Image (spheres, coloured by chain):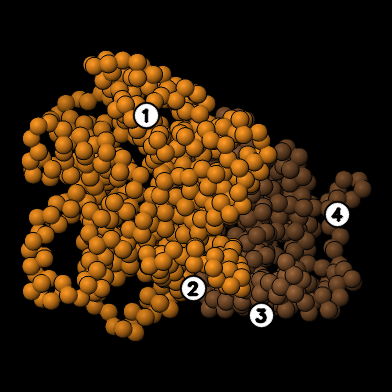
Amino acid sequence: MKPKRLIIQAISIGLGILAACMVAEAVLRFTDVNDYVVLPVDKASGLSIHASDSSYEISRPCLENTVTDNNLGFHGPPVSAEKGKNVFRIVVSGGSFVEAEQVPVSEMFTTLLERKLNADPRRASDYEVIPLGFSGNGTFLDTLYFERFGESLKPDLVILLETEYESAHDDPRFTADGRVDLSLPVPSPSRSPSMDKFRNIYHHSKLIMNVFERLYSRYTELKQEMSDDLARMASFTDSASDSATSSVSKDQGVWDMGAKLMDSLVGTVSSVHARFLLATWAIPGTPTLTTQELRDQSQRSADRDHFPYLDLSPSIADQYARKGASPVWSCDNHWSQAGHEYAAESLYEYLKQNPKFLSK
Amino acid sequence: MTFASLAFVGFFIIISVAYYACPPKARWALLLVASCYFYMAWVPKYILILFALILIDYFLAFKIEGSTGKTRRYFLIASIISNVGILFVFKYFNFFNENVSALAALIHWNYPISYLKLLLPIGLSFHTFQSLSYCIEVYKGRWKPERHLGIYALYVMFFPQLVAGPIERPSHLLPQLKKTVFFDWPTVFSGLRLMGWGFFKKLVIADRLAVSVDYVYGHVGHVPGPSIALAIIFFAFQLYADFSGYTDIARGSARVLGIDIMRNFDRPYFSTSVAEFWRRWHISLSSWFRDYLYYPLAFAGKRMTKLRLYLSTLITFTVIGLWHGANWTFIIFGALQGSFILFAIWTENTRKHLMETVGLAKLKGFLKAWQSFAVFALFAGSCIFFRAPDLKTAFAFLGNLFTGWHISFSAFMLQYFRQPYDTLGFGRGNLILAFGGIGILLVLEYLQGRMPLIDTLKRRPIFLRAFVYTGLILSLIVFNAYVDKQFIYFQF
């Protein structure tokens, strides 16, 4: 083939690809309401955080929501820096379940819990329930976020909400002597303004963001799927019932690390003289053994460090059985409106039965 | 491992590369091992059932060939009993038991047999029927038993069509498993293209429609009639995109390996009668039942009466319904298909006369479109019984279809276009993509009926081909519904 013809063919292919990309971008602009925001980095801590008092859209096949971030950059109602005299502050720390991007602020379990607590006319204090949730956080990052944003709020009670995800995806740093390194990672000076500019540009392309996000999530799923298939075949168990019987279990090392991180967070909370409550919820579809381990390990941590532990799963399952509305979305493993209601009710009942948590 | 997963893509790439790298004589072994791995990714222990069936049919085929008269028949019956017996135990026993026990309760009989806690082996209805067709063909003398056990096992287990068909016949598949395949890029590319189209139908169209269909079926009693009507239409397209998508992936992956698997769908929603629809829908199953059930029922014996033909039609379609699942809903679905065909036969002259009277017969294009619409409406309506988990839900669904139609245009636009979450279970973006997907499917199938699209595309400028293939790949990545829905026919 002549070089000229080859060049023309290459240009034609390139133009064809470009045209397809432009059409896809146009269709996505019309159908994808997600805002792919560039998360600014908090200069004081190096932690990623949403811009304060901002909002963005999220969309899944079965839900759409406008996420309104408060003055601290968290999904939730505005928080006043000063704590009122007769105010009892509950800070709820955690990952995506606390952030609750899937529901409006008025339907978050933290908002519902606050409403329930304040509904009692004989209450001793006015209650504020402040969510400090950031998607993807594990216990380590929860600790860092609490140090940066939670301590100054002078909480009276800190509730940490964890699922099986947190311990599996934690990526902590340790000091040379094996303790958790809580020194906050300051933003890298190497991040140049031109790089930021570039990030801002590609974050405006829905096509690039969709391709990147979806390929990345599929890649992580593939790794998990392959290892699950091989593990199942090796153990000759049943895939259809793996959610009930799979022997998939976390390495003890992961749980040990989780325990260290929990100790560290409990220590941080104690240093501000707040009470601490650990609540867990097992995401549906999590292999039962891991769910059991989450419960056992959480109980063990609670016993060792003398803090109370509440497993939300039985109460939520019970409410689900009675009321019939699924606690999770059909297309997303996070809590639906009903799930938030169930979680708020479970926490409220627990706090009502244990009034010591609600006294200063 | 499901077809619509990256695990399958990884698995398939490895197998395809190994297949062409491996000496031709050993390829059957590679495909057999790959098929075992593929099957065992679901319920590993159930492979023992599959092995047992393979061995039984393998040996019985020789017995059938080596015997005559009644003995020959007995061996065929033994094969039928072992295949259908396994199918009955795993798929129909609890249904049978439930009905007998309900009947026993009516006559105050203490029925002692309890339920079996068994999971349905994946693809059981498909591979038992494929095994059965082998033994029947040997019995009829149309096929010699396969001497190579490995090749026969591969005939039953060939992974692209193991779990949801198409249900192959020995005369079509067995010779291909023995021939030497050379790497041929145009064939491989056409296989990949077919797989890509299959993935598009499954991931972009079917899975997206499933979100809304699942929502509406899950909220029967809470959603108004227009939602139900849309869900009925959506499910008809979901079912087609899901199953034909699966078939395209199966056929495409087999084609990459140089093996041709039969077509299972031939643009069924353009059929102009229900009978034609069933010649173009799930062809491997309907032709199986035509050859091995309908013909023996209708044409065996000395006298062929109209009543016998009608009954054979009704029985065949009722059994086709039952084949799909052990539930009265499927039986009604099948019986409805048979009834539609009988109704069409009985009213043929009247309809012809009516069309001539009103002048419709002259407007051929319009008439065809009207007939296709009517066939679609009948099928989509009967699919309520296919999709509903039980009769109660199906009838509640039908009852609610006629409620909530008194709605203003602005309210309709708000509830069904701008914010359709409460009525359809998904957002505006997904609604647009759902209708867009259905539109693309219909337009391409319509054009396919007028010209061979792939051949036409091959002759188009490279710019257009690059545009189409990039568009397909991008669609699979960014317009994929990402809801991890299993293929509907995997449950059968």
Kind of residue at badge 2: Gly
Kind of residue at badge 3: Asp
Q: Which residue is mark 3?
A: A53
Chain hosting mark 1: B
* Residue at position x 34%, y 81% in the image: B411
Whole-angstrom CA distance, mark 1 to mark 2, is 53 Å
Q: Which residue is mark 1?
A: B143
Q: Nearer the viewer, residue B3 or B294?
A: B294
Few, some or many C-alpha atoms within 10 Å of disc 3 (few <14, some 14-19, many ≥20)?
Answer: some
Pointer 1 or 2: first along the chain: 1
Of all residues, the one furthest to the front in this rendering is A2
Few, some or many C-alpha atoms within 10 Å of disc 1 (few <14, some 14-19, many ≥20)?
Answer: some
Q: Which residue is mark 4?
A: A181
Q: Which residue is mark 2?
A: B429
Mark 1 or 3, which is nearer the eye?
A: 1
Q: Is residue B49 left or right of residue B27?
A: left
In the rendered image, which quarter contains the C terminus of chain A?
Answer: bottom right
Kind of residue at badge 1: Trp
Whole-angstrom CA distance, mark 1 to mark 3, is 75 Å
Task: Give the chain coloured brown.
Answer: A
* Residue at position x 71%, y 73% in the image: A5
Q: Position of residue B168 (x, y in %)?
A: 40, 39
Chain hosting mark 4: A
Q: Are marks 4 and 3 in contact (CB under 8 Å)?
A: no
